[in-house]
Amino acid sequence: MGTEERKVGIFDMLPVMNKERATKFLIYGLLIAIIFGTILMISKSIADNAATWLSLENQQNEMNYMQGLYGYNDYIVKAERAILIRYWMEYQVIILGNISRIGVNVGMFFIAIAFLSFALNDKFDEKTRRIYLILAGVILFVIMVTTFFSQIVVQVY
Amino acid sequence: MLKMSRLLKKRTAYIIIGISIACLILGPIIGLFFDKMTIYDKKEQLIQENSNNGIAEAFAHPVTLSKDQKLIVEISEFYTNSSVTIKIIAKSVYDRAYSLNGTPSGIPSGISGLWFVYSEFGWGASPAGSTDDATALSLPNDGIYFYIEFMGHRVGDSLISWPGDYYIIVYGTNSGPASETDVYFDISIKTDGPGETLNNILIIVGAIILVAYAALALISILKANYLR
């Protein structure tokens, strides 16, 4: 009987991976999560400071007019455009925020798979594998909660 | 070892990132440079006193305005015995007056100018409060320097775009001896240029290149190392 060659897909490799591959998954997952998380925080910061930026822009616009760099109608056009940019600064968080959320979830998925692989790796001792399993579970829980709800809030009283 | 695609090679990365950064930097610079296009700029522009009696002798500069395009005229008059009046009129009105030069209908002072607004800049003055409108301005009677904005029509001090062909006309007199007929003034004529459009296009192109490159680089790393 001849042997059958079967194409190995990504799901066949998961979560039974060797230690090196799982570590790579962990590092890249972290990297993706950090990059998209940073994008999200920058985006939120831009949106939060839109009003301050508008005040600054308005003052600059008024001072440019006072110096005679441009006339009243240019002043109005620039003021209207500044308002439009302010709205975009507030709105972009919706677009970037959702893209970042997908990115962070993908990154966390990679991390969860890596921990799951560690947990299934019999080269680690039983206790360590249990810790890895718990970590994978916690990360999967976070992914699920952040997928169905907007965020996790921890309040300390 | 981490596998890398051709896209991530140092040289390719430098070229792509360099182009995007160049677009992002050049956008505002080019935008500023082409914000206003000077179409006429002259110090000591000379006309004769008889410009007061016939539009053919007056200073006249044609301007074509497209939709939402603004005309900016800076005029000043600091010369001895010279006094000038500026008006902006439709090309049809100018052509008619020109054809009737020498008759009462060809006298510039008898032609009604279109509404424009002018700003009297000053520190602490609100932009709305320091802007006024007029159909003609006489220098130095009304003032010796004016910054005029024109788009065809206006409501209050806000301009309304009436795209079309116009003429800026300046005529004047010399109050000196009868032998002195020279009338001088300084004038600068500008229109809105494509600066803002160029600025927006370059910034958008730069940002798209940067984001697309980052996304493709990330995908290529994942593809080369894991998603096989």
Image (cartoon, coloured by chain):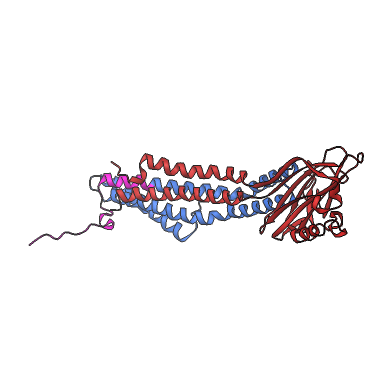
Q: The red chain is which one?
A: B
Residue lying farthest to the right in this orientation: B177
Does the magenta-highlighted stretch encompass residue A27?
yes
Q: Position of residue B44 (x, y in %)?
A: 77, 39
Foreground: B117 or A130?
B117
Q: Where is residue B29 in the image (x, y as percent from the top left)?
A: 58, 42
Q: Position of residue B135 (x, y in %)?
A: 82, 55
Note whether residue A155 is visible. Answer: no
Residue B178 lies in quadrant = top right
Which residue is pictured at 50% across the width and 42% down the height?
B22
On screen, residue B75 versus residue B5, left or right, reads right
Q: Position of residue B191 (x, y in %)?
A: 68, 50
* Magenta segment boundaries in residue numbering: A1-29
Quadrant including the N terminus of chain B: top left
Q: The blue chain is which one?
A: A
Note whether residue B220 is visible. Answer: yes
